[in-house]
Amino acid sequence: IADTVAAPLEQAIVGVEDMLYMSSTSTMDGSLTLTVTFKIGADIDRAQVQVQNRVSQALPRLPEEVRSLGVNTVKASSNLTLVVNLTSPNGRYDSLYLRNYAVLNIRDVLARLPGMGDVQVFGGGDYSMRVWLDPQKLAARNLTAGDVVAAIREQNVQFQIALNAAGRLTDEQQFRDIIVKTGDDGQVVRLGDIARVELGAQAYGVRSLLDNKPSLAIPVFQSPGANALELSGRVRKTMEELKKNFPEGMGYGILYDPTQFVQQSIDAVLHTLLEAIALVVLVVILFLQTWRASLIPLIAVPVSVVGTFAVLLAFGFSINTLSLFGLVLAIGIVVDDAIVVVENVERHIAEGLSPLEATKVAMREVSRPIIAITLVLVAVFGPVAFVSGLTGEFYRQFALTIAISTVISAFNSLTLSPALAAVLLKPHGAKPDLLMRAMNGLLGRFFKRFNTGFARAGDGYSRALGITMRHGAVALAIYGGLILLTWFGFNSVPAGFIPAMDKQYLVAVAQLPPAASLDRTEAVTRRIAEIALKQPGVAHAVEFAGMSVNGFTQSSSASLIFFPLDDFSQRTSKALSGPAIAAALNQKMASIQDAFVIVVTPPPVIGLGTLGGFKLQVEDRADAGPQALFAALSQALGKAYQNPALGGAFSTYQINVPQLNVDVDRVKAKRENVRLSDVFETLQVYLGSLYVNDFNRFGRTYQVVAQADAPFRSQLDDVMPLKTRNAAGEMVPLGSVINVSRSFGPDVVQRYNAYTSADINGGPAPGYSSGQAQAAMAKILDETLPRGMSYEWTDLAYQQLVSGNTGLLVFPLCVLFVFLVLAAQYESLSLPLAIILIVPMCLLPAVTALKLDHGDNNIFTQIGLLVLVGLACKNAILIVEFAKHLQEEHGRDARTAVLEAAHLRLRPILMTSMAFVMGVVPLTLATGAGAEVRHALGVTVFAGMIGVTGFGLLLTPVFYVFVRRASRHVEADGARHTEADSPGHLLSPGASS
């Protein structure tokens, strides 16, 4: 199969547009699964057509039997979306009945659902008319396997005619009555005389179990681009409708459904969103201290959230965990502009202006800063639009959400907030209303103490800022040292990609010795499930005995088990987390001596592999053979076991599966007058199986399969007596023309990107990141693989490799983009430096927090850092804009202007920063579904915002004075050069000619 089917197909498909990689598995039962993975965003319908066209081009090169059966091209996700298990609690129905009930009544109904990619059936087998041949009876009647096949094909035919005539056969007895041979004496040999005919299963492979009880599994695969949550809901609703017609004694369950984790993650983020809103409300009330003033920025929250949802809906985007993460971060941002407006209006009211006049004056002062802040927050995500791959998808979800909410918030602050301020706010000294008196009664003392403390803090800040300004050179030197410290700290944080998550299920892979029987594999599978079901936290076991994790292919010596876990509400301790349960189970699985068993967490992204950690393929590019490939693989795995950065490295590749090698002696065959095609046909029918043609039953079409009965193909000695007919009509034993020997080889042939390959699966050891694990594995392979062999990453590891140092490249590009926007805003290249120089200071506290939290530099920490760029600039803009205004409009010098601006803007800066910090507190304390991702993002922005606010309040004034003085010196030097080069100077009497 690998050489005659997989290779021609791969040669035809390779290079198809937008293809990332392709992999195939060829099994000993003659089946091939070839998976082509495309780039994110590729037109999957077009891709399917292109692949189908290339398959059609390769068909003439494929064996005749493959051409007759056909090659199916299906667009579907490579990972299970969910599994429906049919059960018979009282044992009334066997697996064959359950399977064919599913095929007749369930599979096609589910396949028609919108968003469905593929529906398969594991366990049991499709109905098939099994013709179990007795080679001895055939030989006694001078018949060959080919004679039987020809007779069935001749008498089981489909034709159309105006008259009613018996054509295609439908039941066992009709097949038994097929006439295979008639003698001269009128004797008739029927199929029933030389074979056992029964309605059996087309294949006897995977056995499906549910909590160690027989079941029939119906795996569901979503179509690429489909909404998994919606598909899960449709499947559940449809199964409830179909259940009404189930026969008595049949039931179903959907216990493996990763989409439930997605729904729980969304629910958890929504809960976090509400918590963030509540905390922001408290901060606003704490600082503004009147219900009228507090109401104005709080109105910005629903306006921005609803507006963001409306824009997302208009552009056809769905609400998912990523967009909701963006909203959580945006909650602390959308109130900022309104806070700046209200705070400035109240300051002017306190100076004696009426609310309307105060609003007019305030808006003249803050309109430019609000516009500048909005442009910066939108511009910071500009380069993100050019990031490709999975990383780009993550970035864009956040960028779009935050950008939309920020623009809506700015529009609200420039229109609605001033109008509300002019109407709601009261003149200074006005009599408080009933609600205000109630607030003063409840919180008055607290507000007074807070104001007193804040005033003292403000005085302390002014003194500290004065000292900093007097020692500006020292401050700049310290700033340079902090940048160096940031650089070293950033390089010391391990690289990651997507945080490993507790997805509420685990995956167990079991590998028995080569050629282990399916009965033995099932027994081990039951033992694994029995151990797991006793482990606290494990809810169920969805078992597949006889299935390999590689492409869900059949392998009698392998099994795959999914362990759905209890709900997060029942697993609150660390000992009941997914990784902890997996570690506990791996210790207990060591007691199973009959198999290698490993329990792992799933990948963090659905569709990028079945197992968590990394996966790669070692490729035999020099065609050195299975033995050489296995030797290289074993050497690499041996070193991987000793590497402290790697945990649980293993491979499913085996080459010790007992096999029979059959060599046809062509000289003897010619001497015996035996055609080679007859030899191969006899071997295929008796020892393998042969699809003959089809029959109809239950309104469906099933296969007729011929094969030698089990007693005649179980031993090596059974091969030699098998007979075929020579050209003279004589029966010739195969032993006279063939040589049979025992050998060993792989039961599954893996190929990756058109090369024979072997898989390696693994993950980071505790305390190491995915990036460190991949680097360690790559180093081992670079050192151990011989010439002619190479390796390629796949699944999630491939995406991490492609992303590379995207975060390191995007960050400076975003800073540059912000600088250009500010330069256009201020029409100056120098003044934006006073704002941009504070940006590196958001990295140091974020990196420090990551180190203390034992985190890594993953996509979500990088997104958090991008958000911090905009927020760091926001605070600096408030100081720089007011200082610039005081210099240009009131004639202050740079130092006096920036000191006054910093003092005036202290309260809004602290208020907006605290609002954002409190808004992300729920992220840092996240628990439940998706908590790992929320925590990684929350820790970064929480620490970074606190740090950059403190650094910014002290260093931004220093930067402003430094930039202003440097700019003045540059302008003065330019003026002197201009004067020196002027015509008047050149023509002056003292000028040399």
Image (cartoon, helix red, strand yellow):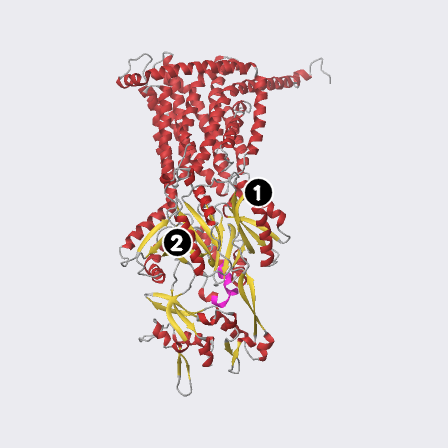
**Residue at left offset 71%, top offset 15%:** 991
- Pointer 2: what residue? 219
Which comes before the other along the chain, label 2 or label 1?
2
Magenta stretch, main secondary structure class? helix
Q: Position of residue 345 (x, y in %)?
A: 38, 18
Is 318 located above or below residue 878 in the figure? below
> Could you say which is closer to the camera, residue 476 or residue 342?
476
- Pointer 1: what residue? 775
Q: Determine the CA span between mark 2 and mark 1.
A: 35 Å
Label 2 Cα neighbours within 10 Å, binned few <14 / some 14-19 / many ≥20: some
The image quarter containing residue 108 is bottom left
Q: Position of residue 221 (x, y in %)?
A: 40, 52
Outermost residue toward the bottom in this view? 185
Question: Mark 2: which amino acid?
Answer: Pro
The image quarter containing residue 493 is top right
Q: Secondary structure at mark 2?
A: strand
**Residue at left offset 58%, top offset 30%:** 488
Q: Does the segment drawn in magenta span residue 367?
A: no
| Residue 798 in sight here | no
Number of disc labels: 2
| Residue 172 in sight here | yes
Answer with left or right where residue 626 lies relative to residue 228. Answer: right
Q: Secondary structure at mark 1?
A: helix
> Could you say which is closer to the camera, residue 229 or residue 411?
229
Is 45 located above or below residue 862 in the figure? below
Q: Position of residue 255 (x, y in %)?
A: 36, 49
Magenta segment = 54-65
Question: Mark 1: which amino acid?
Answer: Ala
Q: Position of residue 56 (x, y in %)?
A: 48, 61
